[in-house]
Structures are given as structure tokens and as C-alpha cells.
Amino acid sequence: MKLNLLKLFCLTAIVYFFSSCGTAGPGPDTSGDLTSGIYVSQLRGNDTNTTGKKNNPYKTITYALSKTKTGIFNKIYINRGVYSQENGEIFPLILPKEVKIYKLDDNDSDNDVYINGFGNFDDKYPVAIVFQGNNKIQNVTINSNKNIGILSSSNNNQITSCNIINNLVGISTIESADITIKDTLITGNTHGIEASGYSTINLIQSVIYKNDVGIRIDDLAEINLNSFGQSVSKITENIKCDFLQKGDKNLDLTGIKWDDNTLDFAIEKVCVNGNNIVNSGLGIINYVYSPIDVMNEDDITHVTINDNNIVNNSPIDVMNEDNITNIVNNSPIDVMNEDDITHVTINDNKVLFKNSKLINITSPTFNERVYTNTPYIKYENTKNDKHIMIVIWKNMPKVIDKTIRIDNSSDIVWFWHTGMQNGFNGYVEYNSGSTPINGNINPSNTNYNPAKPLINGKPYYLTIWEWDDKGINIVSSSNISYFSVAP
């Protein structure tokens, strides 16, 4: 099958960009005795009358795999080149137990290894590479030409510092597979990662970027997104959705950097339009939003420019100089992209109603996960304790500034105001409030429903505002706070 050269060039450019940023940066694991390994070079190797040693390498990975032995000669070091069917490979490349594949570094900056191709495994999986247990592959680029990049049904496998591009499924785990993915870029695939059966995926410091679907979970599979306390991964800019849960097992997605502002973040039911988390299965999803990666220009108050173009982990898409209030750099800015940003400070004091004084919410705090579905609300005492409103929303509140009117009152799930004559200025119990009828929170209404508990595993938004003594003008309001209820 011939590659679309333009598409391969574009994907290779993406791979180069992320590799230069350090996403897949560490060199090969050269621990152990290199003389006991097997060496492969597509450019200068030969599969006949050769020893497979460093100065006399084999030509194909296929032949090298046939020479591996458990315990010894189980490491394969691959020199730069394109390992494809056209160059003698027979796909799929099936790694026997304990076999590990590394890119041979040799301090060669052009030492790029591309594995391009696929073949049928078990008469039903068109795949490039198959793991059979205790396997590892490091510092290579895998492209199955819109099939499966790596398939695993076995345990204790590792993918480290790789680029997984242009596959139908980048990495697929089935049955009871267990695999760790670290420092790896997964981009340009239909599904970046797909886990089914009882399989487990440990994801560490990796980027799932611009696939149709970032990660899909089926059956009773699970994924650990902040494995072993190491740095978090990023799931960003995937076209349909970042994370699709179609399985039956409860999942904890704590420890991921998502690509939306927290206040636009929600769990949806349909995988379209770049939604973050989509849950169409039976399992409950628990998550806490990690620090913001893509920020809205309205929320930026301070930017430091990096003249040396060192990429920082707080990317900003495009900002116009009119939206920036303080720039630490003496040169004017027209348009900046993520390569130019080294420090950003977010304006946390953005109140719900413009020109009103700030009411500080102290519990639940912003981004807090609470372990009750009837949380109490605490805030700093207001000067006027006669006309206060507290509201919890299932979606971010929308305010029409000219009329100071709430545009999505149907998203209100709980409210409390001082007219209910319970609670205290600065502290309100959840059961002191009410669940609204058709979004009606008018203080003149005297018919209140009992407060229905919040739903476990769901995120919510919290706001407070205060009218003047006459109950006409809003004089104080909180920012839009955010919290989630644990499963």
C-alpha cells in the first residue's frame, strides 16, 4: 500500500514539533550488555551471511525477531530507516515474550526509526505490532496505514517515547492486557487508544492530540491517567471527543490536563464537536479538572514572553495585543502562539455581574471534590444580609450583561435566598435550600420544593450575589466557582 506522502509529511511535522518540545524526548534505555543484543539497519544491513552484531547488522526486524531467545538476545537495537513491507518486513511484527525493541541512538540526530505497515493477526486484527508479554518498544514511530498500530492481549508491556500516528487505532488492548504508555505522542489516529475486555492502561506524561477520539474504553477495561504519582498526561484538541466511556466499570480520570477552560468543561453523552468527557456506558466517571492548558483571552492578565522560544506547558492558541493587560517584554505583540508563552496569570476575580463587588466563596473551594451530595456553602459575610441569593448550576451560568439577566435558569439545580428565613450570613446548609420548579428562583415565590441531593460523580457551578437594600440593583457577586461530587 503506497503512503499519501503529503499526509505523512504533515504528520511527521507534528511528530517533530512535539518531540522537540520534550514529549518523547528521553533517549533509548541502554542498560545491560549491548553486545548481547541484536542489531538491525534497514540501510546497511543484510539478512543473509550476517551475525546481527553492531558492525554486521540484520536488515529487517522480522529476521531479527526470529533470532531472539528468552533471557538472552532479547534486545533488538534498530538503526535509522523505514521498516516497511517494501523494504522486506513481514507484518505483523509479533514480539515473543520478553523481547524489547529500542532505537539505536549512537548520538545521531537523524536516527529516526519508522515502522510502516500491517498484516493480519489471528485472522481478525490488521496490525503493525503485536505484544505477547513483557515487551517494550522505545523511541520509534509506528504507522499502520489506518489499521491498528500496536495490539496487546498480554501483561507487563511498555511503550516509551514513541510516536503513534496515522492508525485506525493507535494502541489497542484486549482481554486482560496490561500496558504502560509513557512519554508518547499519539496523534492523527481515528482512535488514539482503545481498551476492551478486562485490560488496564497506565498513561504517564503522554500527549493524546488531534485524533478523532482520544481514548475509548469498553467492557470492563480501565485506565490510570496519573500512574504511580508521575507527571500528568494531556488529552487535547481531539476532533470528536477526548475521552469516550462506553464501558461498565467506574473510572477515575483524576490527573489529566484537558484542553478547555474549566468553566466550559462538562461530561456529555455524545462524542461530537470536541467534547471532553463522554459517558455513554454504565460506569461512573470521577474526575478533577487539572490546571488550565488552553485559556480564554478574557481571563489573561499577565503574560511573560520568552525570546528564546522555549515551550512551556501552558499553551495559548492565539491572543491579540488588545486583550493583554501586562506584557513583560518591551516589544509590541500582534499575535502570539503557544511557543512564545512562558508564564500566564489567570484573573480569578472575575465576578458574575460586572461592576459588582466580589463575594469570596470559601466552601466548596474552586475545583474542590466534595464527598457529600448535600454540601454546605460558606462565603465571606456580606454587608447586607437581607437580599442574598446562592445558586448551584449543572452548566455554566450565562449572564446577559445589558439586562443583568440569567439566560439559562433551566440549568439551576439548587438555590437558597435570605427570604427563606433559614441559614446564616456566610453559612448555609444544603437542606436549607430548594430545588427550583422550571428554573424559577424568584424570591417572591413562597412555594419551595425540598432540596434534591446532587448527583454523585457530576460537576457543578456555584454562584452568589447580593442586591441593595431595596432589592433592585445587584451590588456584589462571586466569581463562577466550580466543584464536583465524588462517586
Image: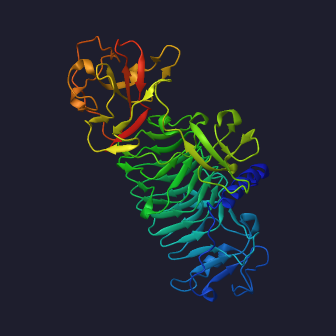
In this picture, residue 406 sits left or right of residue 147: left
Residue 26, image x and y in percent?
61, 69
Q: Between residue 449 and residue 177, name the one nearer to us.
A: 449
What is the image's colouring?
Answer: rainbow
Q: Between residue 144 and residue 449, name the one nearer to us.
A: 449
Above or below, 207 relative to 47: above
In this picture, residue 202 sits left or right of residue 186: left
Badge count? 0
Above or below, 323 relative to 340: above
Of all residues shown, which one is farthest toward the front? 383
Above or below, 149 relative to 295: below
Q: Residue at x 33, y 17 (%)?
A: 441
Image quadrant assignment for residue 475: top left
Residue 315, image x and y in percent?
62, 47
Residue 423, image x and y in percent?
22, 28
Residue 192, image x and y in percent?
56, 51
Q: Residue at x 45, y 59 (%)?
A: 201
Residue 283, visible in the rendered structure: no
Residue 423, visible in the rendered structure: yes
Quadrant for the C terminus, please: top left
Q: Between residue 70 and residue 465, name the one nearer to us.
A: 465
Quadrant for the N terminus, please: bottom right
Q: Residue at x 68, y 76 (%)?
A: 104
Q: Residue at x 49, y 64 (%)?
A: 180
